[in-house]
Each structure stands twice: as structure tokens, then as C-alpha cells.
Amino acid sequence: FQALVLGLYLADFSYTLLYNDFNQSAKYLEVIKALSDNIGVGGIYNERFFSRLEANINNIDSLKSVFNDFSENSFNTVGESGNNEILSLISMGVSIESIYLGYNVCKTESFEKSLKPFFIEQRMVFENFYQNYINYNGNKKDLEAFNTSLSSFYSLFKLNIWLMVDKNNISKTDSIISMDVKYIVKTNNENINELGKSICKLRETFINLSQQ
């Protein structure tokens, strides 16, 4: 469960950088260091990385650059090491906390221009995180309670934001590599608000289970 919690704190750390909250960033940094050692990825989140962060803790541009570069490299390193199980746990922690934080920011702004587009975008992103997570952790007894809540949120996400490929708007961006796929999206304000409540409930369950 600590790998999930590490993902949560990585998302929180990134959030505090975004809003220039240096004091909280430093506190989250200490937690990230401890959790990294506890789950055996301290070799990736190593002293050199933490030293660079601490040296730039009051320089927001440098701090963001160090963290963004390292985040990308560290996820690649965990994946290349073959420890996809740990990677899937960390990624799910990041995903849940990112949706939770994003919801709490966007709900104070325009519903149509911020909150609704945010959940539609996350609907597509979360699908990949969820499928990868379930592939490695779906049958784990110690995660059974969490997985039940997670699956309920995933099902609600699919139900409340319905996506279908718009076959009339598929443009080839490269004839060999990829295509630009557009979706028909069906949802409504009630569904979006329900998802907001649901991510808060999932996050609360996550926190409570992590403290047991």
C-alpha cells in the first residue's frame, strides 16, 4: 500500500510546486524520501535527486525542471527494471490524487470551461492507469477493500462519461505511425457532479486504508 501512498505524495509535491508553496514542498519531500526507501525504490529516488531538489527549494523554475525531468526518468527506470507492479501502484496513487486535486481546483472555476472538460480528459487518461493497475493488482487480498472502491469509481466514470469513436472525424496524422482520433462524448452536469463526489469518497477510502 505504501507504493500507492508514494504516488499520492508525488502528485501533492507537484501540486505545491505549481502553486509555489515551498514550505509544504519541503515537507512532502521528506515523506517521499522515507516512502521510497520503505518500498525499495530508494536507489531511483536517490540522494543526488533529493539533494538537487533541496538545493533549489526556493527557486521555483529550477525546482520544477528538476522534478519534471526526474519524474519522467524515474518512471522509465522502474518500468525498465521489470518492476511493473510497483510502477502500476505508484501510477494509480498519482492518478487518484491528480483527479482529486484537479476537481477541487476546477469546481471553483467555470463548470463548462474547466470542470466538465477536466473530467472528460481524465476519463480517457484514467482508463490506461486503471487497466494497468488491475492487471498487476486486481487479485491481491491486501488490496481487496481498496480495489472494490476503485472499481466502483471506474464503473461510474464509464457510465457518467460515455465515449465513442467518431468514425467521421478520424484524420491520419501519419500514415504509418498514428491517427488523430476524435470522440463523441455524452454526459451532463449531474453526472459530472456525481463524479466529483465519487473521487472525494475514493480518496477518503484511500487515506483511511493507508492509516490502518
Image (cartoon, grey):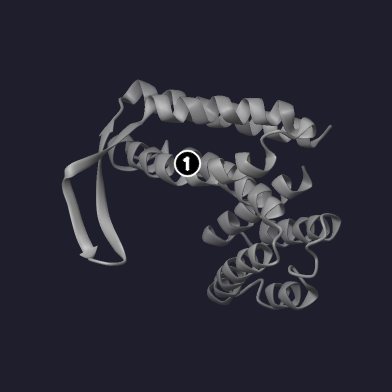
* Residue 106 x, y percent position in the rendering: 42, 41
* Residue 49 x, y percent position in the rendering: 71, 74
Residue furthest out toward the front: 176
Q: Which residue is mark 1?
A: 127
Q: Amino acid at mark 1?
A: Glu
Quadrant position of residue 45: bottom right
Give the vertical position of 45 relative to 12 (above or below).
below
One can see residue 40 in this view: yes
Q: Residue at x 78, y 30 (%)?
A: 141
Q: Quadrant of the N terminus?
A: top right
Q: Residue at x 75, y 35 (%)?
A: 140
Q: Residue at x 55, y 41 (%)?
A: 130
Q: Nearer the viewer, residue 116 or 171?
A: 171
Quadrant position of residue 186: top left
Q: Quadrant of the C terminus?
A: top right
Q: Is residue 67 left or right of residue 112?
A: right
Give the number of marks: 1
Give the vertical position of 21 relative to 136 (above or below).
below
The residue carrying pointer 1 sits among few (fewer than 14), some (14 to 19) or many (20 or more) residues within 10 Å by Cα, namely: some
Helix or strand or loop: what does disc 1 sit on? helix
Residue furthest out toward the left: 168
One can see residue 8 in this view: no
* Residue 57 x, y percent position in the rendering: 66, 71
Q: Is residue 42 left or right of residue 113?
A: right
Q: Residue at x 61, y 67 (%)?
A: 76
Q: Is residue 159 left or right of residue 146?
A: left
* Residue 153 x, y percent position in the rendering: 53, 28
